[in-house]
Amino acid sequence: MSETPVFSTAAVAAPHRLAAETGQTILAAGGNAVEAMVAMAATIAVVYPHMNGVGGDGFWLVREPRGRIHALDASGPAGSLATIKRYREKGYDAIPPRGTDATLTVAGAVSGWGLALELAKALGGQLPLDLLLGDAIRFARDGYPVSRSEERFVTGEESALYEVPGFAAAFLVEGRRAPEGTQRQTPRLADTLERLAHAGLADFYRGDVGREIALDLERIGSPITRKDLETYRARVVEPLSVRLKHSTIYNLPPPSQGLATLLILGMVERLKELRAETPEHHHALIEAAKRAFSLRDRVVADPRNLAHDPSSLLAPQALEREAALIDMKRAASFPLSRPIDGDTIWMGAIDRNGLAVSYIQSVFWAYGSGCLLPVTGVLWHNRGTAFSLDPASRNRLEPGHRPLHSLNPAMAVFDDGRVLSFGAMGGETQPQFLSQIFSRYAEAGMGLADAVEAPRWLLDAKPREREAVLKVESHFDPGLIRGLSRFGHRIEEMDEAYSGRFGHAGMLVKHPRNGRVEAVHDPRSDGGSLGL
């Protein structure tokens, strides 16, 4: 058994140690959990560029000590010139994941930082922006060591990524991934962050930085215009929730796939007499994931294109109906045409007053579009790849609309007063990982460290096959593997601890009786937890 770090009053968890150190510093300086998270988000945007950046998106869940939940959607819409016609005329059947034509949605993360800081101020936050961005600026200007994850991470369309103009010079060494420990400096990004620290975060969209970004995007032929940047603002949205027997779980509404995570947990609870960490329980989670993903793909899109009110799918009667369709004796067919990609960071923070944050930030695939804007040093994401070029699709490309989004930070409030912030990277597979780590903590009674470290599974595609395979980490319990095989699951054991295939997860829980915070981040990542 692994020992979970316990802190007296407050803690942070992040997939990179430098981001965790930044968060600890801000907490020690009197900052609240939201301020700590903005500072962590800026640092990790610099030092973990394959997973996230200022040129990507973000989603927030924030719980006040008295119980109010805030949800912030910092996902960017498609540019004014991003139309199905434009891509069809270029000969595309699908939006390419790399290069100029992948830069079709506004990057929302920085606007999300600004909106979060408005909330932080309302909750008593007083720290100046130059302090919050200080570590990020220093690492960008003075240099930071390339992480183990960045050296080893496996991603799709890698050859196309390396061919994007400017990418190799910025991120490769002799045509290959930079070795772990290589010192990298990003002075243009440092200048951009320094400008934001003095002019304010809105400058990214409506100031000098925004002007330079718009000019760079125009030069490379992106369908994003200056007006698209100027009019963009992150949004406050109403969180989704599902009631379980011992807790209430929260997540983000569409375009986030948070609905899928809540559906999985809600369905499995309605399958009676399941003992945690048995083949039957994992079978239930897997089959619930299949049903949840089917619903997600039919329902989740830009809020203006929704087929159903997503909260209606989380009503008790709806969950009972879906759970009743799960065959508890046999694995259902689950077509999956392509391997799932998507690379992200999740981080959590809980302060001494009990303010809790669950935050996720991403450039979608590793290094996003691969387009590094030359003046600002901003690496632009490729989130628009998730759009469809089929006019009949609910997730069709339309200017101003957001695509189905894989990012979905989670939070749970238990009836005994515990508050749990949890999340994982992993693109579309995130709900699978979240359901496993939550069930291990809440149902199996594992400590946080054991729940996160325990081997995981995921439904994924195999080349040239339509039917999904259940991939499991190589040290998965042999008894569970045998049991799942008897249910008819096609199983493939994988030894890919640092490829990112099985996610980087994290969990923090605040205990009401003594105020202590348990916190852990995945050993599969380069981070950990720190606190006060």
Image (cartoon, rainbow, N blue to C red):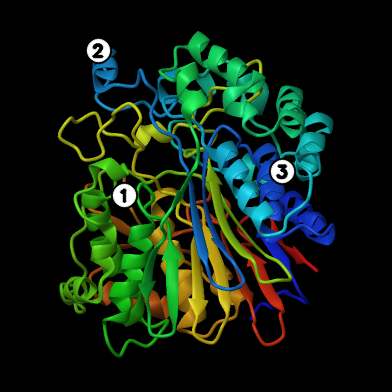
Does 321 appear above or below 377? Answer: below
Earlier-in-chain disc, 2 versus 3? 3
Badge 3: residue crowd in 10 Å (few <14, some 14–19, many ≥20): many
> Could you say which disc has been placed on residue 32 in the image?
none
**In the picture, residue 239 is in which quadrant?**
bottom left
Does 525 appear above or below 179? Answer: below
Earlier-in-chain disc, 3 versus 1? 3
Q: Depth check: 303 or 465 in front? A: 303
**Secondary structure of the residue carrying numbered label 1:** loop
Query: In front of the other: label 3 or label 1?
Result: 3
Residue on which disc 3 sits = 43
Q: Position of residue 517 (x, y in %)?
A: 69, 75
- Measure the C-alpha gap from mark 2 to mark 3: 40 Å
Amino acid type, residue under disc 2 in the picture: Glu
**In the picture, residue 169 is in which quadrant?**
top right
Q: Position of residue 396 (x, y in %)?
A: 25, 34
Amino acid type, residue under disc 3 in the picture: Thr
Where, quadrant-wise, is the N terminus in this rendering? bottom right
Q: Depth check: 516 or 200 in front? A: 200
**Secondary structure of the residue carrying numbered label 2:** helix
Earlier-in-chain disc, 2 versus 1? 2
Q: Position of residue 264 (x, y in %)?
A: 33, 68
Residue on which disc 1 sits = 461
Q: Position of residue 409 (x, y in %)?
A: 49, 58
The residue positioned 19% from the left and 49% from the top of the image is 307
Residue on which disc 2 sits = 89
Whether residue 152 is visible, yes or no, is no
Residue 473 shown left or right of residue 260 in the figure: right
Where, quadrant-wise, is the C terminus in this rendering? bottom right
Pointers 2 and 1 in contact (CB under 8 A)? no
